Image: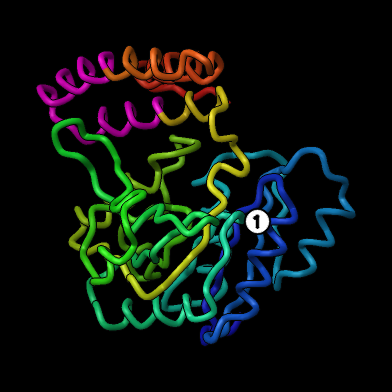
């Protein structure tokens, strides 16, 4: 792989049509990229169908099972860094599509900010609404929040240092990865991006938002917007994150607030029983700090 091209790691699970669109947007970039497709054991497709999408990439990794966001990405990151030394790597969920100048603008900010470990773009939903202009952790509840979610995008025209980089689309400096380590793998889904950013910050790096880089995101295309699986991992991972980063006093207060939150959410989503069940199961699993695959 040429170090002049930015490795773009596309994490695929389901919806091969979205993978095709993501790869097409990467091929249209003004800054050349090397597309590395990672399939996390996508079910329901034969080998030929997966291979047809893999042929669109420069390299494809087919994992036997879905080991989660972190482990699937880490397999590709480790492979890339073992055989080359790029300045940065671009991590993408397969349900994203990039504006033609996205990678170039992310790289420009990374080069302009020597201590930036991660640079994240502005992420919008297909209907144009703002999903994220970076992200932060609400301090009282210790709850990850998408910065600017559903607010007018024009409010977020300025570059800013943020709390963490949402994992659906992020440019990561290779030097920072070598210094702080790969993505923590025990979350399986959600919050691993938060933990990773916190580890970079603890090591003296910064996380930046680039407003001129734009990405469209088909949110929850693989997991399902209100599935039991999503409810489970959202809450489980939030609890695990708090358990690992809060001091004992803060942790106990977090648990009390989380119980109250789950009670409110259970009423709000009463018409979505699987989601509610998933949330409570995730809470229990987070307290026990173990994963359900």
Task: Name the residue: 66% across, 61% down.
Answer: 37
In the rendered structure, the answer to whether residue 134 lies left or right of residue 188 reads left
Residue 290 coordinates in the image, percent (x, y): 44, 22
Residue 194 at x, y percent in the picture: 33, 46
Q: How is the image coloured?
A: rainbow
Q: Does the magenta stretch include residue 236?
A: yes
What residue lies at 40% left-to-right and 14% top-to-bottom?
Answer: 266
Above or below — where is 118 with respect to 112? above
Residue under the image location 26 percent in, 83 percent down:
112
Q: x%, y% of residue 289?
A: 38, 22
Picture quarter with the C terminus: top right
Between 160 and 283, the residue placed more toward the observer is 160
The secondary structure that most of the magenta stretch takes on is helix
191 or 88, nearer to the observer: 191
Assess disc 1: are there few (<14), some (14-19) or many (≥20) residues with their C-alpha within 10 Å of its C-alpha.
many
- Judged from this view, the residue extending furthest toward the left is 249
Percent x, y for residue 45? 83, 44
Q: Mark 1 points at which residue?
A: 38
Classify 31 as above or below 92.
below
Residue 245 or residue 254, whichever sits in front = 254
Query: Is 260 located above or below residue 182 in the figure?
Result: above
Residue 257 located left or right of residue 8: left
Where on the picture, by quarter, is residue 170? bottom left
- Label 1: element kind: strand
For the point 43% across and 31% down, the residue is 234
Quarter occupied by the N terminus: bottom right
Count the marks: how many? 1
Magenta region = 235-260
Residue 83 within the segment the image draws in magenta: no
């Amino acid at each position: 792989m040429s170090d002049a091209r930015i490795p773009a790691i596309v994490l695929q699970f389901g919806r091969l049509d979205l993978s095709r669109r993501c790869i097409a947007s990467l091929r249209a970039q003004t800054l050349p990229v090397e597309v590395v497709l990672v399939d996390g054991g996508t079910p329901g497709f034969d080998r030929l169908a997966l291979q047809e999408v893999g042929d669109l990439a420069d390299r494809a990794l087919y994992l036997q099972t879905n080991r989660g966001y972190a482990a699937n990405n880490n397999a590709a990151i480790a492979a890339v860094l073992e055989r080359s030394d790029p300045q940065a790597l671009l991590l993408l969920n397969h349900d994203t599509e990039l504006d033609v100048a996205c990678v170039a603008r992310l790289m420009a900010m990374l080069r302009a900010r020597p201590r930036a470990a991660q640079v994240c773009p502005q992420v919008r939903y297909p209907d144009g609404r703002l999903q994220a202009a970076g992200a932060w952790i609400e301090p009282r509840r210790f709850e990850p929040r998408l910065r600017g979610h559903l607010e007018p995008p024009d409010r977020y025209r300025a570059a800013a240092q943020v709390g963490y980089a949402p994992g659906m689309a992020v440019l990561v400096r290779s030097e920072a990865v070598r210094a702080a380590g790969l993505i923590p793998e025990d979350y399986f889904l959600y919050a691993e991006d938060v933990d990773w950013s916190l580890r970079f910050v603890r090591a003296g790096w910064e996380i930046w938002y680039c407003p001129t880089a734009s990405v469209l995101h088909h949110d929850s295309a693989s997991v399902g917007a209100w599935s039991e699986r999503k409810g489970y991992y959202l809450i489980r991972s939030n609890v695990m994150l708090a358990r690992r980063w809060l001091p004992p006093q803060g942790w106990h207060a977090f648990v009390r607030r989380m119980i109250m939150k789950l009670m409110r959410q259970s009423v709000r989503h009463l018409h979505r029983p699987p989601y509610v069940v998933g949330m409570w199961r995730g809470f229990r699993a987070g307290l026990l700090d173990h994963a359900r695959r």
